[in-house]
Amino acid sequence: LAAFTAAREQKWIRARELATAVVRRNPESYVGHHVLALAQHEGEANFPVALREEQLAIAAFARVYGDPPHPGAPWRWHAMMLLELAGIQGDLERHAERLATLDRYNSLYQPPMLAERAWSLMKLRRFDEARLAARDGLGSGDAWQVESALNALCAVEFEAGQYGRSYEACKAALDHGRA
């Protein structure tokens, strides 16, 4: 708990030190591996090590609670780990893997991460699918999804070479942010 709290407070060195001690004592600690992944990803930008640690965390969690987690399992940990894994995969430009992780998350948890798919689809140059993912986010009514979707549409249209549409999408994102 102290390691996770340090990570939540963005005290990355302390989080890493505490999580390293946890994993030394218990190599099967999904919390310890998850905190190490957070520290490596967010604190040190060591994405390959973060990926390995998050994969170890998810595997350790699955050995205890199943895959998917059985009823009564602490599912919020699993949900957090999947979202962190997707973030790391995106930073490593592993967009097909990121899409699979987001699909896995969406098959298990609510609210679904819809607009987040747009970024990886854009990076894979699947612009029409990226637009659809962003529109799904817009239609969700969820404030975070709407914000992500507007931001994604701005980037998607720019990357697709649709500069007029990009301008309009970026303006809509800016207007939404101001409102």
Image (tube, grey):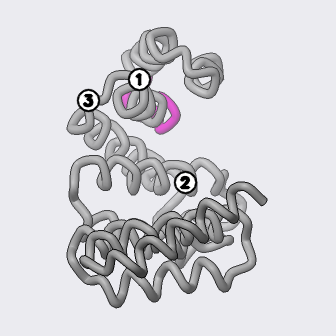
Residue indicated by mark 1: 43
Dot 3: within a 10 Å radius of its alpha carbon, few (fewer than 14), some, or many (20 or more) residues? some
The residues bearing labels 3 and 1 have C-alpha atoms spaced at a distance of: 8 Å
Residue 33 as seen in the image, left or right of residue 171: left
Residue indicated by mark 2: 78
The residues bearing labels 2 and 3 have C-alpha atoms spaced at a distance of: 22 Å
39 vs 132: above or below = above
Q: Residue at x 33, y 75 (%)?
A: 163
The C terminus: image quadrant: bottom right
Q: Position of residue 42 (x, y in %)?
A: 42, 31
Q: Residue at x 45, y 48 (%)?
A: 84
Closest to the observer, 23 or 51: 51
Closest to the observer, 34 or 11: 11
Rendered image quadrant of residue 99? bottom left
- Check disc 1 and give the amino acid type: Gly
Please tell me which of labels 2 and 3 falls first in the chain: 3
- Check disc 3 and give the amino acid type: Asn
Residue 146, labelled with which disc?
Answer: none
The N terminus: image quadrant: top right
Q: Secondary structure at mark 3?
A: loop
Q: Position of residue 157 (x, y in %)?
A: 36, 76
Closest to the observer, 93 or 166: 166
Give the number of callouts.
3
Q: Residue at x 30, y 73 (%)?
A: 122
Residue indicated by mark 3: 46
- Check disc 2 and give the amino acid type: His
Is-magenta flag for residue 143? Answer: no
Please tell me which of labels 1 and 2 falls first in the chain: 1
Rendered image quadrant of residue 2? top right
Q: Which residues are magenta?
A: 26-32
